Structures are given as structure tokens and as C-alpha cells.
Amino acid sequence: MINDHTDSYFVLLRGARRFHEAEYQGDRTLMARLSQGQEPDVLIIACSDSRVDPALIFGARPGDIFVVRVVANLVPPRRPGDATAYAVMAAVEYGVKALGVSHLVVCGHSHCGGITAAMDTARGQEPPPFECLGPWVELADGACREVLAEDSEGERTDAETATAAEQRSVFKSVANLRSYAWIQERVESGDLTLHGCWFDIDTGKLWTADADTAVFRPLPV
């Protein structure tokens, strides 16, 4: 008997067939060009969350964006010899140095489980009981503690606090990107621009902010 999990995998296989029919048996112009190489101009660091696919959110086609997906869209600061950082930054380095992207975006989102876990830990609860996840979300600890300190009177709702932590974490990651000389040099030369975004799953709205500010505003629709 096929269980629900197997059914979901077969759904993906049907999707793969539809993609093949559309892009390889129909108009093959795009994929034929991409088979010769990729030239994306935008690199997006996004969360692994299944609800926030950057290609869908930004209406991108194959070849448009170079994507790095990791829990809570976190970027480690530069720490020479830190293999944890390499897992994320190897892809970023390839996008910046080899592909020469002009824009580097850190995109957070609402209802982020990784930030929720970091916030719970910042409040004094036990870290997630996972070998890898707990140490990873510690990267968001500073952002979470700042948000909690700003609301010492408890005037924000839980939802407002979560949003503030998710957005603050985006800018911590942008700041960590600047700790890599090969990124900061390109920013200063004008060859690379850093951006912060936050996607609201409830409304479908994308919020954007300049990398040098901490203010997010919804993209007009």
C-alpha cells in the first residue's frame, strides 16, 4: 500500500515531468541557453522553510537568481577555520566571486521556526533538542536579546515581537556579510549592493529595507 508520504513524492515526480514537457519538449530556448552556463545577477539567502520559496515569491525563472537556503536565513560572521560558516559562505563566495552577482539579498519571513527557537532560548528556555539545530540558531541570539531588551515592559504582542526578531536577524546577517573582506570591498566599490527583505506568509506581502537602515516597509501592491 502507498502511504501519504510516498504519494507526496510521486506528486513531485509528476511535477518534474510537467517541467520537462514545458521546458524541454516545448520552447527550449531558455534551458538551451542555460545549458551553456549561468549568469544570475542576484543572490538570495533565504530560509529552508517550505512555505517561502524565493523563486515563487519573486516570480523568478531558472537562471534568474542564485539561491542559498539555510535555517532562518542566518549568515555566520567571519571566523577563520569555522567549518560551520563554510557551509553557507562557500555558496555566497561562488555567487559573488565566480558569478559576479550585483545584488545580495537576505530574505527572512514570518512564522520562522528557527527564530522562534532562538527567541525561546533567549528567554531562558532550553535550546532545541537537536544535535545541529540548537548551535546553529544561536547565531540569532544577539538579535533576539536586543528585541527583548527593547520591550522590557512587554508592550508588544507575541506576534509583534516575533516579527521584530525576524527582521532584526536579517540585518544581523547583512552585518555579518560585511565581515568578509571580499564582500565589503565590492560594496565599497559599488559593484555589490546588500539588501534586506522579509516575507509575510499571512498577507503575501514582501517587506524591503535598505541594508544601511533598520526600517522595513511593505512593497506596494
Image (cartoon, rainbow, N blue to C red):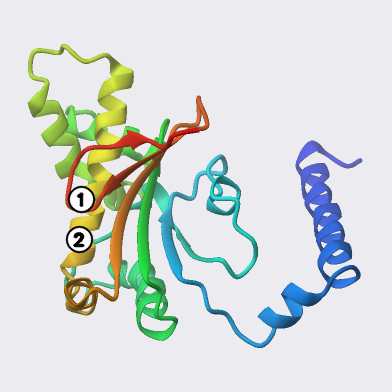
According to the picture, the residue beneath numbered tag 2 turns out to be 176
Compare residues 98 and 84 and report the one nearer the observer: 98
State yes or no: discs 1 and 2 in contact (Cβ < 8 Å).
Answer: yes
Compare residues 154 and 61 and report the one nearer the observer: 61
Q: Is residue 126 visible?
A: no
Please tell me which residue is depicted at 36% across the width and 46% down the height of the picture: 197
Name the side, left or right, on which 46 lies relative to 124: right
- Per the rendering, the mark at residue 91 is none
Furthest-front residue in this view: 220
CA gap, disc 1 to disc 2?
6 Å
Furthest-bottom residue in this view: 36
Tell me where residue 5 sits by quadrant. top right
Q: Amino acid at mark 2?
A: Asn
Name the side, left or right, on which 83 lies relative to 108: left
Q: Is residue 85 visible?
A: yes
Where residue 134 appears, as percent x and y from the top left, is 31, 46
Height in image: 178 above or below 70? below
Height in image: 204 above or below 59? above
Height in image: 153 above or below 127? above
According to the picture, the residue beneath numbered tag 1 turns out to be 172
Please tell me which residue is depicted at 56% across the width and 66% down the height of the picture: 64
Number of numbered markers? 2
Where residue 68 appears, as percent x and y from the top left, is 45, 63
Tell me where residue 112 sits by quadrant. top left
Q: Amino acid at mark 1?
A: Lys
Q: If the image is split into quadrants, where does the N terminus sit?
A: top right
Where residue 111 appears, as percent x and y from the top left, is 42, 30
Element under label 2? helix
